[in-house]
Amino acid sequence: MKKLILVLSILLLVGCKSKKVTNTPEPVEVKIVKLSLSAIDENQKSKAYELGKRVLMTCNTSKFKPFNESEATQSVIKNTTEEKLTKTCTKFRQYYGTFKDLQLVEAYKNIYEKTTVFRYKALYTKKVANKELRVSMNEENKVSSIKSLDWVDTFQNK
């Protein structure tokens, strides 16, 4: 019996041995810098506008010319299909009316991801709600993401 208590005590002592704490690396802070619209390359600005407008014009015409490899990354090409756009456009036309145009409001440089984020106000015939189209361009001048959000005056990195 004494041997059993001694063995259990030793196991308990070994089991309770403090473990060495390893230092966890600090999370990388995403640095985002607001750019002046005049400091942005005109080619990149116009390409972001044209590609963003092409997506939203699908709602008016029901025809979408798919992105090619010189315009967008593989993930954007894969995720931007006519079927997905048609589903989204049905909701947008019902709530906001016909798409008119995009108005560039501001641009940001994401230093960590090395992308430029263009914030456009999407203008529709109905004035029910304001929508934002966010087009991100990478260093290769390709669309790396396109998002539609409700308009908020202050930029929030989502």
Image: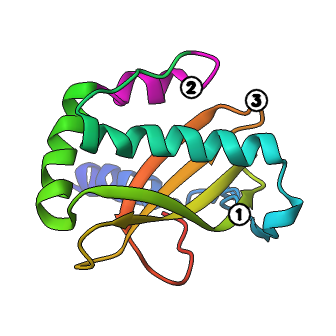
Which residue in the structure is indicated by mark 2? 73
Q: Residue at image x 63%, y 60%? A: 21
Q: Residue at image x 51%, y 84%? A: 153
Compared with 93, 130 (above or below) is below
Q: Magenta includes 70? A: yes
Give residue 44's quadrant in the image: top right
Of the numbered discs 1 and 2, the one sitting upstream in the chain is: 2
Q: Residue at image x 74%, y 65%? A: 31
Q: Position of residue 100 (x, y in %)?
A: 38, 58
Q: Position of residue 146 (x, y in %)?
A: 47, 45
| Secondary structure category for the residue under label 1 | strand
Q: Which mark is residue 54?
A: none
In the image, farthest residue toward the right: 39
Residue nearest the viewer, comparing 148 with 42: 42
| Circles 1 and 2 in contact, beta carbons < 8 Å | no
Q: Residues within 10 Å of mark 3 (few under 14, many from 20)?
A: some
Q: CA separation, marks 1 and 2?
A: 19 Å
Q: Residues within 10 Å of mark 1 (few under 14, many from 20)?
A: many
Which residue in the structure is indicated by mark 1? 108
Compared with 94, 128 (above or below) is below
Looking at numbered disc 3 in the image, what kind of residue is underneath it? Glu
Q: CA separation, marks 2 and 3?
A: 9 Å
Q: Residues within 10 Å of mark 2 (few under 14, many from 20)?
A: some
Which residues lie in the magenta part? 69-81
Q: Position of residue 136 (x, y in %)?
A: 60, 47
In the image, farthest residue toward the top: 69
Residue nearest the viewer, comparing 20 with 34: 34
Q: Which mark is residue 140?
A: 3
Q: Magenta includes 140? A: no
